[in-house]
Image (cartoon, rainbow, N blue to C red):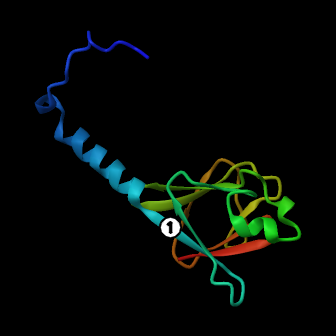
């Protein structure tokens, strides 16, 4: 634990309005949620993700019930919300992440929109809600 008694207080009136609005925007973005619905007849299963959430083998309960769940990497992909848009990033998964049948390059952000199909390792499809 550090002693902060010698640190002077910040005069909030000197903080720019731009900085304040940027902080408020970051707070709003943290509250945003994206829903992915499993594309399987009569499933109805969904996952709700916030910006920064990672989807992987152990992060979604029903993955372990699948026979071939080990094809899904432990850290498969991440969703991000920035500047009012949602993005997906493959996290160097072994068997790939696909967006509308296009294989994603690892560590690169791709915008996702309602109706897009996200495929994990060629075995699980989700529809962006």
x, y percent for residue 89: 62, 54
Residue 20 position in % (x across, y down): 23, 42
Left/right placement of residue 41 relative to residue 115 reads: right
Q: Position of residue 103 (x, y in %)?
A: 74, 63
| Residue drawn at x 82%, y 53% as measured from the top left | 94
Query: Which residue is outermost to the front?
Result: 1
Q: Residue furthest top?
A: 6
Q: Residue at x 66, y 74 (%)?
A: 126
Q: Is residue 4 left or right of residue 70?
A: left
Instruction: Say which residue label 1 marks.
Output: 34
Is any part of residue 122 visible from this angle?
no
Quarter-of-image position of residue 87 = bottom right
Q: Nearer the viewer, residue 100 or 59?
A: 59
- Describe residue 26's horizontal placement relative to residue 122 as left or right: left
Q: Eyeballing the image, is 4 above or below 15?
A: above
Crowd around label 1: few <14 · some 14–19 · many ≥20 (10 Å): some
Looking at the image, which is closer to me, 19 or 9? 9
Q: Residue at x 67, y 73 (%)?
A: 100
């Amino acid at each position: 634990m550090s002693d902060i008694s010698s640190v002077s207080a910040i005069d909030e009136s000197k903080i720019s309005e731009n900085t304040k609005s940027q902080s408020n925007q970051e707070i709003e973005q943290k509250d945003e949620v994206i829903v992915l619905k499993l594309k399987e007849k009569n499933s109805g299963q969904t996952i709700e993700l916030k910006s920064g959430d990672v989807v992987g083998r152990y992060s979604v309960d029903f993955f372990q019930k699948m026979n071939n769940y080990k094809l899904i990497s432990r850290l498969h992909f991440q969703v991000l919300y920035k500047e009012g848009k949602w993005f997906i990033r493959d996290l160097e998964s072994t068997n790939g992440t696909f967006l509308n049948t296009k294989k994603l390059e690892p560590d690169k952000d791709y915008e996702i929109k309602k109706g897009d199909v996200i495929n994990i390792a060629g075995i699980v499809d989700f529809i962006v809600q």
